[in-house]
Image (cartoon, grey):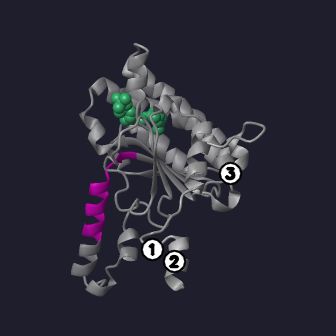
Amino acid sequence: MVINKKGKLEELIDQNNLPQHIAIIMDGNGRWANKRLLPRTMGHRAGMSSLKEVVRACSDVGVSTLTVFAFSTENWKRPLQEVDYLMKLLVEYLHRELEELHANAVRINVLGDYNSLPHQCQLEITEALQITRNNTGLKFNIALNYGSRAEIIAAVKKLAAGLLAGEICLEEISEESFAACLTTSGMPDPDLLIRTAGEMRVSNFLLWQIAYTELWVTDCLWPDFSREHLMQAIWDYQHRERRFGGLSRNKQGEENV
Ligand code: FPP
């Protein structure tokens, strides 16, 4: 880590090499609460504060898209009380933050089937989508009741239906037409995937979209994740070489000699 005289990594961020799209697996809320002998729900509440800070930071720094994994299709397996609390927190978050998000031109979008969430969640989501739909700032995707395999199967079915109906031919099935059937259609793939709480897995999150994404895993638990951690992740990203299966710039040169 490089800190300048003012001690602010943020000032060293190269504006010309920002990750356009950052995805985050916000893990470790439960462990954060356990360490403090608090109920797990308090970990989720503290995690909401980190989310607020990170959305603000992404907006400030000029990241164009942020996608956070807030509730997976597998999270329904958790105790009812925890699931209920997470749903209430979502309502609270949208209710409280919508004004500021809208004022900052953030465009909210939901990845995943939110029709099976509690009615109040659906209402808040519908309002948030409606109010922010024309905003041109940060695109903020909240993955809710989201699972990447289910998303892929839905895309396959969409293409297959088009094929059966004679609307498309086999040759038209391509990486591009497939990606256009995903919920992230029209967005760039994530450049950077951040995972907190140290687990080395991708947990059914954006499996198609992260094919060439840079992974950044930290032991920091999500409620402890701050603007500085985000800047560190961006700074590290900017010091990696992305080859997309090709050769490094150096080796490329040597090959050409
Ligand atoms: C994973 O931590 C986190 C979640 C399943 C929920 C994420 C939710 C928030 C950050 C709350 C704010 C979000 C919104 C949209 C209001 P975990 O519970 O699996 O942690 P553990 O692995 O330590 O048990």
Which residue is found at the position 40% from the left and 75% from the top?
176
Real-space CA distance between mark 1 and mark 2, rounded to the nearest whole angstrom: 9 Å
Residue located beneath label 3 in the image: 13
Asked whether 194 falls inside the magenta stretch, the response is no
Mark 3: secondary structure: loop
Point out residue 8 in the picture as x, y percentages from the top left corner: 72, 39
SS majority, magenta: helix
Establish whether ligand 1 lies closer than 8 Å to the Cβ of label 3: no
100 versus 21 height, above or below:
above
- The residue mark sitting in front, 1 or 2, is 2
Q: Give, as a three-letter code, the residue at label 1.
A: Gly
Q: Is residue 137 left or right of residue 194?
A: right
Residue 80, quarter of the rendered image: top left
Q: Give, as a three-letter code, the residue at label 3.
A: Ile
- The residue mark sitting in front, 2 or 3, is 2
Would you say the residues marked 1 and 2 are in contact, meaning their CB atoms lie under 8 Å apart? yes
Lower sequence index among marks 2 and 3: 3
Quadrant placement of the C terminus: bottom right
Label 3 environment density (alpha carbons within 10 Å; few <14, some 14–19, many ≥20): some
Q: Give, as a three-letter code, the residue at label 2.
A: Gln
Real-space CA distance between mark 1 and mark 3, rounded to the nearest whole angstrom: 26 Å
Q: Start and end of the magenta stretch?
A: 144-158
Residue that lies at the very extreme toward the right in this rendered image: 5
In depth, the one of 30 and 132 nearer the eye is: 30
In depth, the one of 3 and 194 nearer the eye is: 3
86 versus 21 height, above or below:
above
Q: Which disc, if any, is residue 246?
A: 1
Residue located beneath label 2 in the image: 252
Residue 165, quarter of the rendered image: bottom left
